[in-house]
Amino acid sequence: MLETSEIKDLEKKYFEVIFNIISSNEFKKDLIKIESYIISHYDYLDKNWDEKNKLKIAAERLIRFYFYRRLEVTNIYPSPLSADMAIELDDVILNIDAKTIDMVGNAGDDNSIHFQKNQITFNNEPFFAQKINGHNFTGVSFPPRLESYNNNKPCLTFFVTVNYFDDTDKKTFRLSHMSLCNVPHSQVAEEDFNNQLISNYKTYEYIGKVKAEEFGPEFAPLKDVTDDSISFALKGNGAFDSFLDPNLDHPFNPGCKSVRKKIGGKWQIITYGGSARIDKQKLKNRIDSSNENWLGYKSLTLTE
């Protein structure tokens, strides 16, 4: 296992390497080629492509092409629990996730990085922990699925986001800007951020009918909660939207009681956060092993 200071330097090193790739004239020219293709084939894509996002696949393809060509890749990362692109280099396992955001209707999404548990190594502090009528609720956690190390190399995570405007009413498309973020490794998240990086959860995971068969019928979704269930506000304020079952321990968290929320017309037990967000600005100001400042978030324009 490396010293945390060494991982900080590796995150800084590969941030600079990746940013140099995506900010190169060659890379940007190829992005413009994709933009031109989408514009000239707009009607065809709009009619035959099932998703509104016409850029996603091409952007992912472009990133893979450049990174495999520019980086000295020694191997692929074999685990499916990883980012879209995961490769082994001499000193790190590099996880790179491509994001594309339509600024028509989704501009707010550009303020944060959205991710799944298989894209991070740090264990964030749980949300909404509280005592409910003397019963312990330890909160909703978001346990990482990406391992911190593989082959004695730290697993590092980077997000490349390409933003665009797609106005389907006017049938116009244009690129806007691009950004790069580094989400800290588990050791860096603990030392520099006290494991408090996530701003909120975008979705949650629950125990549905099929999953309940693994744990027992008492964990199955309920049409109505039991009479002794205790209502409370999960987030600590606002409407009472959840129920704690004082007689049912959580299947994954010892010492914690199960909490249910109404999903799809039935009360289901919350297990974990399903997807999460980190404010990009929180990732911006970083320090290396020499306490020198560096930026863990940068953006650049793609328009004239």
Image (cartoon, rainbow, N blue to C red):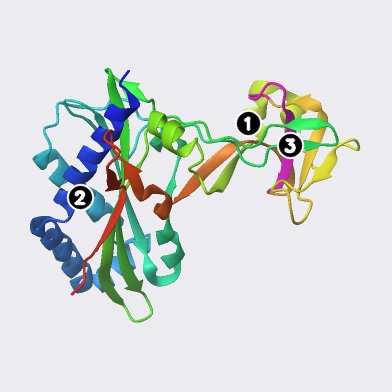
- Figure quadrant of the C terminus: bottom left
Closest to the observer, 44 or 226:
226
**Residue at position x 18%, y 53% in the image:** 22
Which residue has dot 3 on it?
259
- Mark 3 is on which residue type? Val
Expressed as whole percent of the image width and height from the top left, the position of residue 212 reads: 67, 28
Which residue has dot 2 on it?
19
Is the residue 56 above or below the residue 286 in the image? below
How crowded pointer 3 is (Cα within 10 Å; few <14, some 14-19, many 20+) is rated as: many
Q: Earlier in the sequence, mark 1 or mark 2?
A: 2
Q: CA distance from mark 1 to mark 2?
A: 44 Å
How crowded pointer 2 is (Cα within 10 Å; few <14, some 14-19, many 20+) is rated as: some
Is the residue 196 above or below the residue 143 in the image? below
Q: Is residue 224 visible?
A: no
- Figure quadrant of the N terminus: top left
Residue placed farthest to the right in the image? 227
Which residue has dot 1 on it?
210
Expressed as whole percent of the image width and height from the top left, the position of residue 273 reads: 57, 40
